[in-house]
Amino acid sequence: MKKEAEFIAGGGVTTPRGFLAGAVKAGIKYADKRRLDLGILLAERTGAAAGLFTTNKVKAAPVLLDIERLRKGTARAVVMNSGGANACTGKQGMADAIETAALAARHAGVEPEETLAASTGVIGVTLPMDRIRQAIPKIVLSREGGHDLARAIMTTDTVPKEAAVKADGFIIGGMVKGAGMIHPDLATMLCFLTTDARVETAFLRQALRKAADLSFNMMSVDNDNSTNDTVVIMASGLAGGEKITRGGRRAETFQQALNQVCIYLAKESARDGEGATKLIEVKVSGAASLKDARLAARAIAGSMLVKTAVHGSDPNWGRALAAAGRSGAEVTPEKTELFIGGTRVVKDGEPVAFDKAEVVGHLDGKEVTIALDLHLGRGAATAWGCDLSEEYVKINAEYTT
Amino acid sequence: MKKEAEFIAGGGVTTPRGFLAGAVKAGIKYADKRRLDLGILLAERTGAAAGLFTTNKVKAAPVLLDIERLRKGTARAVVMNSGGANACTGKQGMADAIETAALAARHAGVEPEETLAASTGVIGVTLPMDRIRQAIPKIVLSREGGHDLARAIMTTDTVPKEAAVKADGFIIGGMVKGAGMIHPDLATMLCFLTTDARVETAFLRQALRKAADLSFNMMSVDNDNSTNDTVVIMASGLAGGEKITRGGRRAETFQQALNQVCIYLAKESARDGEGATKLIEVKVSGAASLKDARLAARAIAGSMLVKTAVHGSDPNWGRALAAAGRSGAEVTPEKTELFIGGTRVVKDGEPVAFDKAEVVGHLDGKEVTIALDLHLGRGAATAWGCDLSEEYVKINAEYTT
């Protein structure tokens, strides 16, 4: 059993040593400046950095900029906004992303080339650069600024989502936004992670990919993935000590701690999915391979019919089996075993008598667990999703107008 | 330009010569027998038959039975029910499917081995065989029975969906049910097609596959596909004349007519999707390949964000581009051109000024067209879907309970 890292109460991106943050009301979406919508995350020292970005072929300008700037494996700052995605905005969009990063760099006293940008909001609208130019100099960077920054990137999120854990001499902090368009292989979802650990870039890249595969790539709100998905980690190195490298002494400890932060943030994102009233956790075991387990778990967590059944506390377990069956995973129906909460509802592919009141009671709760044992092999994976409510439709039918 | 076959007003599965049908209220779902839920489609002569079935690894008992029985390439009858899917019902389910087919065969005076079965409804509940045994002898088969049969297979469908076309000396009829769980590569969707044409089995199989690829495999209601999806075509041969064979004189005419019936039924299914208020037609052109065009069209038609935007008449075109971008199709953002209705909203990947009132007016209509030209090649495809409404969630949150 791996030792778990310890969560730090009230922790976030500025909890690790060497990070400052701040945010302002720039009026990007709402001219009346009713909310925080622009901010900066700054590392006090240049350290290793890594990023993961949307696999969508339509990538927002800041995503294209960040991919380019992270090639060298370091970064100092990220400027981020909600209220506009700066996607499908052409050459003007790229010019605006570059200018925004340059303004943030000047304000923070770092180089433009080590400054990243991230945007979220409506696609196809250029950023209001006049407001951004006025607002950036007003951003106050502080050790306490992480919480404001977590609010500044919210869109339809109902709560900010932050975490920090303490492990063997280092801290990892993080925050995420993303309530819609969340799906395997990233979504709009912006996630920023920080650590004071001294880490090698090559290791950091690999660790981020592994952690994302267990967390953000296993959650789904609505099967769409976005033009802007971004996960960035920056390391200040201020914890000192021996550098953490691939295969090195603390590599596994770091990986474990990073997994914990990412899984926590992924679950909180699914729980806060647009219109969501329940978190759904799907555990698949006994799959023929890890890949199959991941496919089946994600298919169940993402199924609209499963999501609506959970919403209505309807123990319609056939929908979970059907979702696994179309997932691409190997499934031998007569071997399947399915549990809702702790209650077995299917054995050997057939319904078994169960206490319906008990299952409905579980489905009425805030966290619903569906466990499928395929009885074919040793592949296992966990995915997270949320129920689908009328509220989701209302939110998404009225987003731009 | 291919010559279009002529639609026959009020046509259905018993419009081609040599087909009888009938349905009764068996009380399968509702003990009070409030609705038609069991029926038989009968060919007066044994002829060629072909079927397409769900790709889901969890297949309902009747699907497994039909796949086996269609190997010989002929069939005389199909017994069908709503109110229970007979899926995930194990050995009992298969025994029930075989018995139901045998009872229907005896009643219709044909061999059990040339009788197929089809079921739709809740998964995991065995069929009420006592009621089915009592009801089958009461089914009256007639030339007018197609309309009753189309009603008997409805579940959450709001209207029966039937059609028939007349071409070069033959007629093709069809009916479909399927309002939820509809998605590329079939869904619960039951579709039965009939023709009086004399056709070779090998050709019929190929023609059915081609027609399905242009119709049922291009429609999506909710991205789920079911354990029961079935498309079956039976040919009575009573139109006489030269047998239609692959590459033969009337092969193209038959294919064209079959395409028309299937596309009509697919569109009507999407229009009648659960909770749907609008039909969405997505035309992708200029794709690098046919495959890419199909991927992009289906991704847009199936996107929850596109569907909710259409529901709210929100001209949020970025969602359509984002869906194409994640579809797997080759997309060069700066070449894309997008139209909503007749109005161009994106050119060279960037928004262009458009008359918002005009676009909203189109989105307020009952049929919404989204056209995407990728400007990369000659691949073109059309997909159909429907908007996503609060009503969809209500229907699916309360299905079994």
Image (tube, coloured by chain):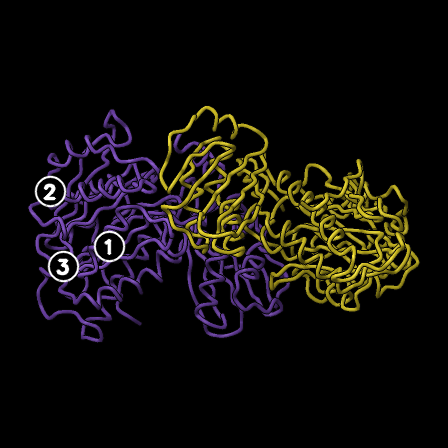
Chain colours: A purple, B yellow
Q: Quadrant of the N terminus of chain A?
A: bottom left
Disc 3: CA contacts within 10 A as few (<14), some (14-19) or many (>=20):
many
Disc 1: CA contacts within 10 A as few (<14), some (14-19) or many (>=20):
many
Disc 3 residue type (three-letter): Asp
Q: CA distance from mark 1 to mark 2?
A: 19 Å
**Residue placed farthest to the right in the image?**
B109
**Residue placed farthest to the left in the image?**
A109
Tags 1 and 2 touching, CB below 8 Å: no
Comparing A358 with A56, the one in front is: A56
Q: Earlier in the sequence, mark 1 or mark 2?
A: 2
Image quadrant in which you'd find residue B105: bottom right
Q: CA distance from mark 3 to mark 2?
A: 18 Å
> Residue at point 32% right, 42% down?
A87
**Which label belongs to residue A141?**
2
Tell me the chain of label 2.
A
Callout 3: SS: loop
Tell which tag, 1 or 2, sits nearer the viewer.
1
Q: Position of residue B127 (x, y in %)?
A: 74, 55
**Which label belongs to residue A196?**
3
| Same chain check for tags 3 and 2 | yes
Is residue A270 shown to the viewer in this render? no
Disc 2: CA contacts within 10 A as few (<14), some (14-19) or many (>=20):
some
Classify B363 as above or below B395.
above
> Residue at point 13% right, 37% down?
A139
Q: Quadrant of the C terminus of chain A?
A: top left
Disc 2 residue type (three-letter): Leu
Classify B26 as above or below B69.
above
Tags 1 and 3 touching, CB below 8 Å: no
Tell me the chain of label 1.
A
Where is mark 1, residue-wise? A232
Q: Earlier in the sequence, mark 3 or mark 2?
A: 2
Disc 1 residue type (three-letter): Val
